Image (cartoon, rainbow, N blue to C red):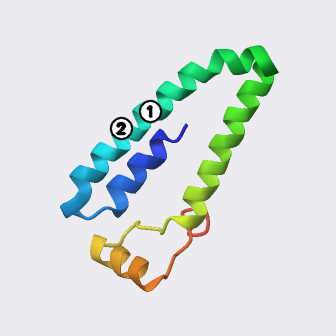
Amino acid sequence: MFGPALYIVRAELLPLSVRAIGGSMAVMTSAITGFLMAKSFLPLTGYFGLEMNFLMYATISMIMALIICYFLPESRGKSFDEVQKQMEAGIVVKGPINSV
């Protein structure tokens, strides 16, 4: 569910000095969320039904996609230093949806 977002942030926005720690945190978070999804799937299916369960997971995934598109800066064609300076200045260039 949130796994790909963690790897996008790690690869694009973390400086080299903390990329190893950020990467390990991303993998750990991905493993924990994967475990929680696997453990919650059958109980939620029993309570709400299979269709509602998948609808809930799809909704959460769409919310995560919107967060990525609107709150993470566009980094295509920019150096890491340029992206870092924009983030420090509070300038957020909208994501790939608005840059096409």
**Whole-percent x and y of residue 65?**
60, 50
In this view of the protein, which residue sits in the foreground, 78 or 43?
43
Left or right: where 59 falls relative to 9 = right
Mark 1: which amino acid? Answer: Ile
In this view of the protein, which residue sits in the foreground, 33 or 79?
33
**Whole-percent x and y of residue 54?**
71, 27
Q: Residues within 10 Å of mark 1 (few under 14, many from 20)?
A: few
Q: Residue at x 55, y 37 (%)?
A: 1
Farthest-out residue, bottom? 89
Mark 2: which amino acid? Answer: Met
Say which quadrant the C terminus sits in: bottom right
Left or right: where 5 falls relative to 25 = right
Q: Secondary structure at mark 2?
A: helix
**Whole-percent x and y of residue 4?**
46, 42
- The image shows residue 82, relative to residue 18, as above or below, that is below
Q: Quadrant of residue 86?
A: bottom left
Q: Are marks 2 and 1 in contact (CB under 8 Å)?
A: yes
Q: Residue at x 25, y 51 (%)?
A: 21
Left or right: where 79 falls relative to 94 = left
List the residue tagged with mark 1.
Answer: 32
- The image shows residue 51, relative to residue 94, as above or below, that is above
Q: Residue at x 56, y 71 (%)?
A: 94
Distance from label 2 to label 1 (Cα)? Answer: 6 Å
Q: Residue at x 28, y 43 (%)?
A: 24
List the residue tagged with mark 2.
Answer: 28
What count of labels does the image hold?
Answer: 2
